[in-house]
Image: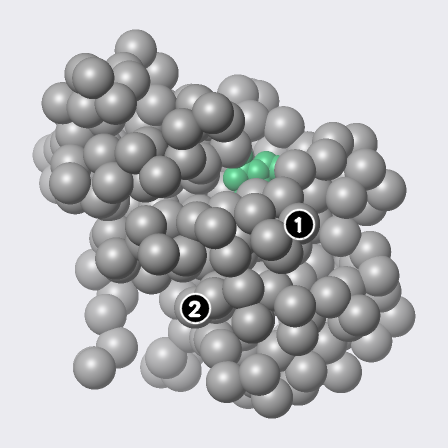
């Protein structure tokens, strides 16, 4: 498949009904989600706990699009194989999560899945300049990771622009994660992002019974960019 830099929406199931993941995933995909973003937290790298490999494996058969697994864990290397075997299409690791991001990205690629590298708001873009050739995606965090529903950190807009320049014509996606709304989406899209993670902005006000709200929320983000 040719590389696609058009805008993609990746709802984070961190904001879904935790008792009903299968139907929640179906609902967001039916309503036009491009990817499904799975936030993995370890209570150590970030102050929250979410999904181990068995949970991700249980999500897998429900995801018809692309399962993007964001690992907010440290250490990360011992768990890469388990998340790949659970069915991740892409595994993203944080540059801050260990001393050897190059080795981590090599290990992800060795599993035959796409590799993403994430930058926290406090980490300069230079931290990834020497690993870009191993990356299929750069994730620019626009909140400090750990929770949904936080306020967008605006320094991420200029950072996105610098990442976009650094990437040049390489086929590397730029993903934004944290505080994406119809107000902030156009800023990062204009700066060069193409994958927008959104948790609360997609799920707010909706449910599997009222899935059209998810669709309207996603459309509001798309409309904010094209207008
Ligand atoms: C934060 C997670 C995000 C989070 C985004 O640590 O990585 O994916 O779910 O949630 P919102 O869109 O509500 O900021
Ligand atoms: Zn995330």
Instruction: Say if disc 2 is inside 8 Å of ligand 2.
Output: no
Q: Is residue 8 left or right of residue 162?
A: left
Q: Nearer the viewer, mark 2 or mark 1?
A: 1
What is the crowding at mark 1: few (fewer than 14 residues within 10 Å), some, or many (at least 20)? Answer: some
Q: Is residue 33 left or right of residue 185?
A: left
Q: Residue at x 47, y 25 (%)?
A: 19
| Rendering quarter of residue 61 | bottom left
Q: Residue at x 57, y 83 (%)?
A: 111
Question: Compared with residue 37, is residue 151 higher up or lower down, i.e. above or below?
Answer: above
What is the crowding at mark 2: few (fewer than 14 residues within 10 Å), some, or many (at least 20)? Answer: some
View extreme (top): residue: 205
Q: Residue at x 77, y 44 (%)?
A: 42
> To which residue does mark 1 refer?
52
Q: How many marks?
A: 2
Instruction: Label 2, secondary structure: give it.
Output: loop
Q: Going from the N terminus, do you reach mark 2 or mark 1 first?
A: 1
Quarter placement of the C terminus: top left
Q: Which is more toward the observer, 99 or 64?
A: 64
* Residue 72 point in image, percent of width and height: 69, 49
**Spatial separation of the CA atoms under disc 2 and disc 1:** 16 Å
* Residue 89 point in image, percent of width and height: 43, 68
> To which residue does mark 2 refer?
89
Instruction: Label 1, secondary structure: give it.
Output: loop
Residue 208 visible: yes
Instruction: Say if disc 1 is inside 8 Å of ligand 2.
Output: no
* Residue 196 point in image, percent of width and height: 37, 45
Question: Compared with residue 190, is residue 210 higher up or lower down, i.e. above or below?
Answer: above
* Residue 208 point in image, percent of width and height: 25, 23
Question: Compared with residue 87, is residue 38 higher up or lower down, i.e. above or below?
Answer: above
């Amino acid at each position: 498949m040719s590389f696609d830099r058009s805008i993609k929406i990746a709802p984070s199931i961190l904001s879904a009904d935790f008792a009903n993941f299968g139907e929640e995933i179906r609902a967001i995909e039916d309503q036009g989600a491009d990817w499904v973003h799975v936030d993995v937290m370890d209570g150590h790298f970030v102050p929250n706990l979410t999904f181990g490999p068995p949970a991700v494996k249980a999500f897998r058969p429900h995801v018809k699009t692309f399962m993007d697994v964001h690992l907010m864990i440290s250490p990360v290397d011992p768990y890469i194989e388990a998340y790949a075997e659970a069915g991740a299409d892409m595994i993203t690791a944080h540059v801050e999560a260990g001393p050897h991001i190059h080795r981590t990205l090599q290990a992800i690629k060795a599993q035959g899945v796409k590799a993403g590298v994430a930058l926290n708001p406090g980490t300069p873009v230079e931290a990834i300049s020497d690993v870009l050739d191993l990356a299929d995606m750069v994730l620019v965090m626009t909140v400090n990771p750990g929770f949904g529903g936080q306020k967008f950190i605006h320094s991420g807009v200029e950072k996105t622009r610098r990442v976009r320049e650094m990437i040049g014509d390489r086929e590397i996606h730029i993903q934004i994660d944290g505080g994406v709304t119809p107000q902030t989406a156009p800023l990062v899209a204009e700066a060069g992002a193409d994958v927008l993670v959104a948790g609360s902005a997609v799920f707010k006000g909706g449910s599997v019974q009222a899935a059209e709200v998810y669709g309207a929320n996603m459309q509001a983000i798309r409309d904010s960019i094209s207008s």
